[in-house]
Amino acid sequence: MPLVSELLRSGAQGTRPAEGEIWTICPICGERVRMDEAVVDDEYPLETTYHCPRNCGPVLAVSLTGALLWEDGGWRTGDWIIRNVSDLYWQPRGREPLLLLRARIHAFG
Protein backbone atom coordinates (compact mmCIF):
# COMPACT_ATOMS: atom_id res chain seq x y z
CA MET A 1 0.00 0.00 0.00
CA PRO A 2 1.22 3.50 -0.67
CA LEU A 3 2.62 5.82 1.94
CA VAL A 4 0.99 9.24 2.32
CA SER A 5 4.11 10.93 0.87
CA GLU A 6 3.67 8.94 -2.34
CA LEU A 7 0.20 10.45 -2.86
CA LEU A 8 1.02 14.10 -2.22
CA ARG A 9 2.53 16.56 -4.67
CA SER A 10 2.89 20.31 -4.38
CA GLY A 11 3.34 23.13 -6.86
CA ALA A 12 3.70 23.24 -10.62
CA GLN A 13 6.80 21.02 -10.59
CA GLY A 14 4.96 18.32 -8.64
CA THR A 15 7.39 18.27 -5.72
CA ARG A 16 6.78 15.25 -3.52
CA PRO A 17 7.34 15.68 0.22
CA ALA A 18 9.39 13.14 2.17
CA GLU A 19 7.74 11.20 5.02
CA GLY A 20 9.89 13.13 7.52
CA GLU A 21 8.56 16.46 6.22
CA ILE A 22 4.88 15.56 6.77
CA TRP A 23 3.39 15.83 10.25
CA THR A 24 0.15 16.00 12.21
CA ILE A 25 -0.95 16.29 15.83
CA CYS A 26 -2.05 13.18 17.72
CA PRO A 27 -5.68 13.74 18.77
CA ILE A 28 -5.08 11.84 22.04
CA CYS A 29 -1.76 13.11 23.47
CA GLY A 30 -1.59 16.39 21.52
CA GLU A 31 2.03 15.79 20.45
CA ARG A 32 3.40 16.37 16.95
CA VAL A 33 3.83 13.16 14.93
CA ARG A 34 6.08 13.12 11.86
CA MET A 35 5.11 10.40 9.42
CA ASP A 36 8.62 8.90 9.49
CA GLU A 37 8.29 8.56 13.30
CA ALA A 38 4.80 7.04 13.23
CA VAL A 39 4.29 3.30 13.51
CA VAL A 40 3.13 2.22 10.05
CA ASP A 41 0.78 -0.74 9.72
CA ASP A 42 0.53 -1.92 6.11
CA GLU A 43 -0.58 -5.45 6.93
CA TYR A 44 -3.96 -5.02 5.25
CA PRO A 45 -3.94 -4.93 1.44
CA LEU A 46 -6.42 -2.04 1.15
CA GLU A 47 -5.08 0.32 3.81
CA THR A 48 -1.94 1.81 5.37
CA THR A 49 -2.45 3.16 8.89
CA TYR A 50 -0.11 5.51 10.75
CA HIS A 51 -0.17 5.26 14.57
CA CYS A 52 1.16 7.66 17.18
CA PRO A 53 4.59 6.39 18.32
CA ARG A 54 3.43 6.86 21.94
CA ASN A 55 0.81 4.09 21.53
CA CYS A 56 -2.18 6.48 21.49
CA GLY A 57 -3.80 5.08 18.35
CA PRO A 58 -4.19 5.96 14.67
CA VAL A 59 -3.44 9.48 13.42
CA LEU A 60 -3.78 8.95 9.65
CA ALA A 61 -4.77 6.26 7.16
CA VAL A 62 -4.44 5.81 3.41
CA SER A 63 -7.26 3.61 2.09
CA LEU A 64 -8.30 2.31 -1.29
CA THR A 65 -11.55 3.96 -2.30
CA GLY A 66 -14.57 1.75 -1.91
CA ALA A 67 -18.10 1.71 -3.13
CA LEU A 68 -19.24 3.57 -0.02
CA LEU A 69 -17.71 6.96 0.81
CA TRP A 70 -18.94 8.83 3.85
CA GLU A 71 -19.27 12.59 4.04
CA ASP A 72 -16.20 14.40 5.40
CA GLY A 73 -14.30 11.11 5.68
CA GLY A 74 -11.14 11.98 3.77
CA TRP A 75 -9.34 13.49 0.81
CA ARG A 76 -9.46 11.55 -2.43
CA THR A 77 -6.35 11.32 -4.58
CA GLY A 78 -6.80 9.00 -7.53
CA ASP A 79 -7.88 5.58 -6.26
CA TRP A 80 -6.87 6.41 -2.68
CA ILE A 81 -8.33 8.36 0.23
CA ILE A 82 -6.14 10.12 2.81
CA ARG A 83 -8.00 10.03 6.13
CA ASN A 84 -6.58 12.46 8.71
CA VAL A 85 -8.21 13.26 12.04
CA SER A 86 -5.95 16.30 12.59
CA ASP A 87 -4.62 18.87 10.13
CA LEU A 88 -1.76 17.51 8.01
CA TYR A 89 1.28 19.73 7.40
CA TRP A 90 4.31 19.73 5.14
CA GLN A 91 7.45 21.45 6.37
CA PRO A 92 10.26 21.39 3.80
CA ARG A 93 13.69 21.68 5.40
CA GLY A 94 14.45 25.27 6.40
CA ARG A 95 10.98 26.60 5.54
CA GLU A 96 7.76 27.44 7.35
CA PRO A 97 5.13 24.67 7.66
CA LEU A 98 2.47 24.58 4.97
CA LEU A 99 -1.02 23.26 5.63
CA LEU A 100 -1.61 20.36 3.25
CA LEU A 101 -4.96 18.91 4.27
CA ARG A 102 -7.51 20.09 6.82
CA ALA A 103 -8.68 17.51 9.37
CA ARG A 104 -11.67 15.38 8.46
CA ILE A 105 -13.90 14.88 11.49
CA HIS A 106 -15.20 11.53 10.24
CA ALA A 107 -11.82 10.18 9.10
CA PHE A 108 -12.11 7.03 11.18
CA GLY A 109 -15.84 6.45 10.94
Image (spheres, rainbow, N blue to C red):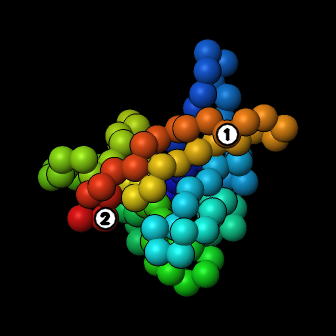
Instruction: Pick whichever of labels 2 and 1 is earlier in the sequence.
Output: 1
Residue that sits furthest to the right in the current view = 94
Residue picked out by circle 1 = 97
Of the pair 69 and 104, the residue shown nearer to us: 104
Tag shown at residue 108 = 2
Residue occupying image coordinates x 78% and y 35%: 95
Q: Position of residue 46 (x, y in %)?
A: 37, 62
Nearest to the observer: residue 29 or residue 14 = 29
Compared to residue 73, the image places residue 26 above or below, namely: below
Q: Position of residue 14 (x, y in %)?
A: 62, 24
Name which residue type carries label 1.
Pro
* Image depth: mark 2 or mark 1 in front: 1
44 sits left or right of 55 in the view: left
Q: Residue furthest front?
A: 30
Work out which residue is located at the far bottom of the displayed protein and give it.
Answer: 55
Q: Amino acid at mark 2?
A: Phe
User: For mark 1, does the 10 Å Cα neighbourhood hold few (<14), some (14 to 19), or many (20 or more) residues?
Assistant: some
Q: Which mark is residue 9?
A: none
Task: Please name the residue shown 23% across and 52% down the image.
Answer: 66
Q: Is residue 66 left or right of residue 25?
A: left
Q: Report the side of 6 relative to 71 (left or right).
A: right
**Judging from the image, what secondary structure is the residue with disc 1 in?**
loop
Q: Can you see residue 57?
A: yes
